[in-house]
Image (spheres, rainbow, N blue to C red):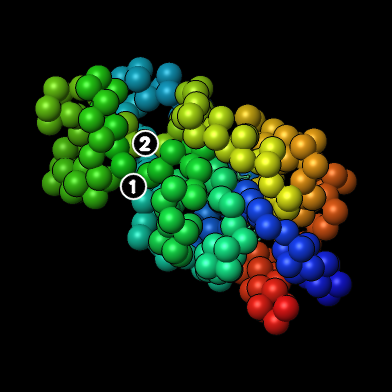
Amino acid sequence: MEEIERLAQLIIESQKVIVFTGAGISTESGIPDFRSPGGIWSRYDPEDFTIQKFLSSPAARKTIWKMSVEGGLLTEAEPNLAHYAIAELYQLGKLDCVITQNIDNLHQKAGVPEDKVFELHGNVGWVVCLSCRRRFPMPEVLQKIKEGIEVPDCPDCQGILKPDAVFFGEALPQETLQEAIRRAQNCDLFIVIGSTLVIYPAAYIPTYAGEAGATLAIVNLTPTPFDHYAEVVIRGKAGEIMSRVMEKVRLS
Ligand code: APR
């Protein structure tokens, strides 16, 4: 496929590559995305995942904790070929950073250093207390739920514990967002993988990169509103595509 060749050539010519990922990069790891047929929002109501709902009552929190555990959002998934292809970009010294909407920690697990992963929507590996802001590893809190504490609260101050993912209606982590935008405005190649690009402000970031002169590439199973901005659009599965791209980059 000549688009595979084209994307490999763009990577070879670039010094500062940014990869922007969405849930579509993790479906091959067994984590459902949100808007594909059978995705999370075809099984759960996004309205139940607003911060207002979470704060409204212990019953709402019990439902959300229950959904999070059942919804597979917290399973021990493994990185797939697409995550490892991005980690190889880092090993080749090509990767400026990963900007991800995902909360599954798979980029870090695949070998991209923590300080090169900007998580716009938080990380489901941690739980934060909304009163004293202390953070706890998710496995510790999940253990309490498995022992029957259906709505865990902070062991220090009895405040409300919330998964450290960004709920609808919540602000994104501002420092992370600002740094991600700054980086996007200073890269040569901006590759989007596995996102519908319909959720803002995350979906603005590819525009900022393009406006600042970066070349845009999109690897996605289905069309996105930004396809017409992209120099290269590759329709297909991220794992296979990114593996084939990296094979060609390695040969250069
Ligand atoms: N390879 C390539 N693309 C894929 C694959 C795959 N294996 N599997 C799915 N996709 C594509 C789908 O076609 C879809 O266009 O990935 C995209 C996933 O889009 P969404 O499910 O909308 O996920 P995302 O774009 O990350 O959603 C953004 O919305 O619900 C909120 O906070 C949540 O971070 C999430 C945000």
Which SS class for mark 1?
Answer: strand
Left or right of 123 in this view: 95? right
Query: Which amino acid lies under the numbered mark 2 shown in the image of this protein?
Result: Asp
Left or right of 84 in this view: 4? right
Residue 208's x, y, as percent? Answer: 73, 35
Which residue is disc 2 drawn over?
Answer: 164
Q: Is residue 171 above or below residue 252?
A: above
35 or 202: nearer the eye?
202
Q: Which mark is residue 125?
A: 1
Query: Which amino acid lies under the numbered mark 1 shown in the image of this protein?
Result: Gly
Q: Quadrant location of residue 83?
A: bottom right
Residue 193's x, y, as percent? Answer: 66, 55
Circles 1 and 2, Cβ within 8 Å, touching? The answer is yes
Q: Quadrant location of residue 237?
A: bottom right
User: In the rendered structure, which disc, 1 or 2, sits on the residue that comes first in sequence?
Assistant: 1
Which SS class for mark 2?
Answer: strand
Question: Can residue 39 be seen in the rendering of this structure?
Answer: no
Question: Can residue 75 be seen in the rendering of this structure?
Answer: yes
Residue at 19% in and 29% down:
153
At label 2, counting other C-alpha atoms closer than 10 Å, the crowd grade (few under 14, some 14-19, many 20 or more) is: many
